Image: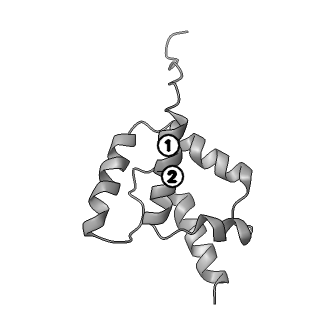
Amino acid sequence: MSGQVAPRPLGPKSRHYWLVMRMAKATGVDLVKAMEDDQMTQDDWSRIVTRCRGCQNPDGCSKWLADLDAVGLRDAPESCINAKRFAAMKSAIEEITP
């Protein structure tokens, strides 16, 4: 059993749901449009929130989001466990939107 890492409990559903919602908005990702354009399914949404719940640094995202008012839209921080997913959705939506 030596060398195994114990599973970390997932963070609170509500907190991480709202972190994901705020991160999407902050990065310019329209989640409704992503669903309408088949860039995201309900299962994808569930996985994104669950990944966020497993993050080791949700306070870092909370701080980043709090500081956002002074900066405006920008890419998710590299430390965001869903940063690549947000970037991919945003890019896909921009390609589709005239």
Q: Residues within 10 Å of mark 1 (few under 14, many from 20)?
A: many
As displayed, is residue 85 above or below residue 33?
A: above
Q: Disc 1 versus disc 2: distance between alpha carbons?
A: 6 Å
Please tell me how many numbered marks the rendered image carries.
2
Q: Amino acid at mark 1?
A: His
Q: Position of residue 34 (x, y in %)?
A: 66, 68
Q: To which quarter of the image does residue 77 belong? A: bottom left
User: Circle 2 is placed at which residue position?
Assistant: 20
Please, what secondary structure does the residue beneath circle 2 have? helix
Q: Position of residue 83 (x, y in %)?
A: 48, 57
Residue at 59 percent across and 40 percent down: it is 50
Q: To which quarter of the image does residue 72 belong? A: bottom left
Q: Is 75 left, or right, of 48 in this rendering?
A: left
In this view, the residue in front, 79 or 40, is: 40
Do the residues under discs 1 and 2 have CB atoms within 8 angstroms? yes
Of the 4 image quadrants, the one containing the C terminus is bottom right
Residue found at the very far bottom of the displayed protein: 98
Q: Position of residue 32 (x, y in %)?
A: 64, 66
Q: Amino acid at mark 2?
A: Val
Residue at 49 percent across and 49 percent down: it is 18
Q: Position of residue 73 (x, y in %)?
A: 38, 71
What number is the disc on residue 83?
none
Residue at 73 percent across and 49 percent down: it is 43
Q: Is 55 left, or right, of 62 in this rendering?
A: right
Of the 4 image quadrants, the one containing the N terminus is top right
User: Is there any visible trace of residue 70 in the rendered image?
Assistant: yes
Q: To which quarter of the image does residue 31 belong? A: bottom right
Residue at 38 percent across and 40 percent down: it is 57
Q: Residues within 10 Å of mark 2 (few under 14, many from 20)?
A: many
User: Circle 1 is placed at which residue position?
Assistant: 16
Please, what secondary structure does the residue beneath circle 1 have? helix
